[in-house]
Image (cartoon, rainbow, N blue to C red):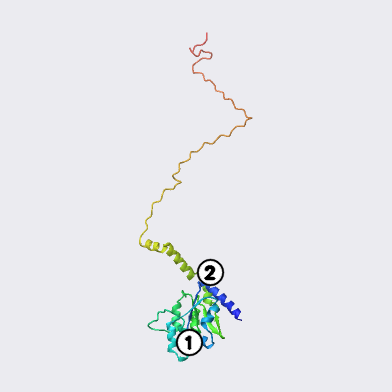
Amino acid sequence: MKIKRQKLAKKTISFYKYNFGFREPFQILVDGTFCQAALKNKIQIKEQMPKYFMGEVQLCSTKCALNELETLSKELYGAKLILQRFQIRKCKHAKEPVPASQCLLSLLGDTNPHHYFVATQDRELTAALMEIPGVPLLYIILNTMVLDKPSACSLKHVEAVQLGELVSSTQQQSIQTLKAEQGLSKVREEGQGKKRKRKRGNPNPLSCLKKKKQRMPQQPKKADGEKKKRSRHRRHRPVGLNVGANPDTGSAPS
């Protein structure tokens, strides 16, 4: 059963790798409900999480999640100790803390640009996260960690990208980096401010060519067997001379 669970997890992780650009080390956002469930079921998160993901992971949380555990009952003190060992990600609620679910949703945004996995037992938070494409969910069932299969929203997003209706976040980032490397963004900004003068083009090289002389059509050569016709020229006599007259004197012969 454990091998089957790891195969399913590997398949799900590869889905998010190839379609949403997830890379190691995998960042996993953990809230207090997940730590409490792990403590209750005697699951050591730091040791078992890398084995389950078959790679390097970074466990992290927020100050709002820690403050939520501090304000609740003393029964969650153990969960608070576990959560304190993880890295703390900066959020926008440093002065006025908010509930952990609201903080995590604001950290993910509409597209999960930082590629977070979310480990939680909160059902309301899970339902809200399933409406965001590219958010893998992790929870505990029957003393085991389970990586949920991709949501319907994520599958629709991938299908739309494959059909060419949308551009994925990774493609957008690669396009922006290519533009920055080639300086296309600066050229566009400069071109919008100034009107570009149109340069006079060179004449068409075909129009500069000399006209070719038309060759006269050659007459077909006669065959060797044909005889050339002999042209006879008649000698014209001068007008006023009698027949038989001397051409020098014009007089008739005596």
Task: Check if mark 2's residue and mark 1's residue have beta carbons within 8 Å.
Answer: no
Quarter occupied by the N terminus = bottom right
Tell me which residue sits at (55%, 81%) in the image: 146
Mark positioned earlier in the residue sequence (2 or 1): 1
Q: Amino acid at mark 1?
A: Ala
- Tag 1 secondary structure: helix
- The answer to which of 56 and 65 lies nearer the viewer is 56
Q: Is residue 22 above or below residue 40?
A: above
Where does residue 171 sit, x and y in percent of width and height?
Answer: 48, 68
Callout 2 environment at 10 Å: few (<14), some (14 to 19), or many (20+)? Answer: few
Callout 1 environment at 10 Å: few (<14), some (14 to 19), or many (20+)? Answer: many
Q: Amino acid at mark 2?
A: Gln
Q: Which residue is mark 2?
A: 162
Of badges 2 and 1, the one in the foreground is: 1
Res. 223 image quadrant: top right
Q: Which residue is mark 1?
A: 79
- The answer to which of 130 and 96 lies nearer the viewer is 96
- Tag 2 secondary structure: helix
Where does residue 139 sit, x and y in percent of width and height?
Answer: 53, 82
Q: Is residue 142 above or below residue 208?
A: below
Residue at mark 2 to residue at mark 1: CA–CA distance: 42 Å
